[in-house]
Image (cartoon, rainbow, N blue to C red):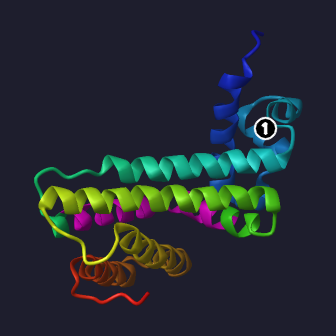
Amino acid sequence: MAHTPVAERRPQLVQAAIKLMAREGISAGSTRAVAAELGVAQATVHYTFGTKQELYRAVLEELTRSQVAQVEQVVPAELGFEETLGTWIDVLWQSVRAQRDRYLLLTELTAFALRDPYLHEATIEHTRNVTAIVTRLVGEAASGSGLEPAVEPEVVARFFLAGFDGLILYYLTEGEDEPANLQLSHLRAATIALATGRLSATS
């Protein structure tokens, strides 16, 4: 059998780990189980990542990359500020509903990583990356529509993400669309109000 380079095997193992743990939970993500999911020897996982901790970090980074990519792809053309923000908030929520298991895994990994100094660094990077992307999107939406935001775009981004993360946890717990959709509409309105000055922010 031909040897598969590490550069090629690594993303395969990451995707196998995501598929396995999204289906069965983080506790199921042993190196043996991940290897079996892809159909390779357990030694291949250790050779590629060294430790399970490094594998978990790679999974967290890939989930982050995927989430950021989804947000970046939502760039409505020729819409006003409120319509633009509303559109990408709705699309991002659709991704949560369509990929519930992946967001559950991201939530599990984040909680797990908070007690691990090595993995904690990855969660910090995840938060910073997502915040930076949303900050840029808010700034671009304001600039494109000629709006001068009432507060800094980063303030709007952090406000939205804090509420959105809470809404995700609520949805993962309750699993009901209608209450979550109602709360999303409130969050959307509050985020737009903060950015446009209809909702004051405290420093």
Q: Position of residue 134 (x, y in %)?
A: 39, 60
Q: Which residue is most to the top?
A: 2
Q: Position of residue 202 (x, y in %)?
A: 40, 90
Q: What residue is rendered at 81% in x and 63% in y?
A: 116
Residue 101 visible, this orientation: no
Q: Is residue 144 left or right of residue 150?
A: left
Q: Residues within 10 Å of mark 1 (few under 14, many from 20)?
A: some
Give yes or no for residue 92 being in the magenta stretch. yes
Q: Splitting the image into 4 quarters, where does residue 10 fall?
A: top right
| Rendered residue at 76%/42% (across/down) | 34
Image side of residue 79 versus residue 72, left or right = left
Q: Is residue 105 left or right of residue 69?
A: right
Residues drawn in magenta = 84-108
- Vertical placement of 192 versus 112: above or below? below
In-image side of 21 versus 194 (left or right): right
| Residue 138 at least partly seen | yes
Q: Amino acid at mark 1?
A: Ala
Please name the predominant secondary structure of the magenta segment in the image.
helix
Looking at the rendered image, the quarter that the C terminus falls into is bottom left
Q: Quadrant of the N terminus?
A: top right
Q: Nearer the viewer, residue 73 or 36?
A: 73
Q: Residue at x 29, y 51 (%)?
A: 74
The one nearer the camera, 161 or 202, is 202
Q: Secondary structure at mark 1?
A: helix
Residue highlighted by disc 1: 36
Q: Quadrant of residue 55?
A: top right
Q: Residue at x 74, y 68 (%)?
A: 114
Q: Position of residue 140 (x, y in %)?
A: 26, 56
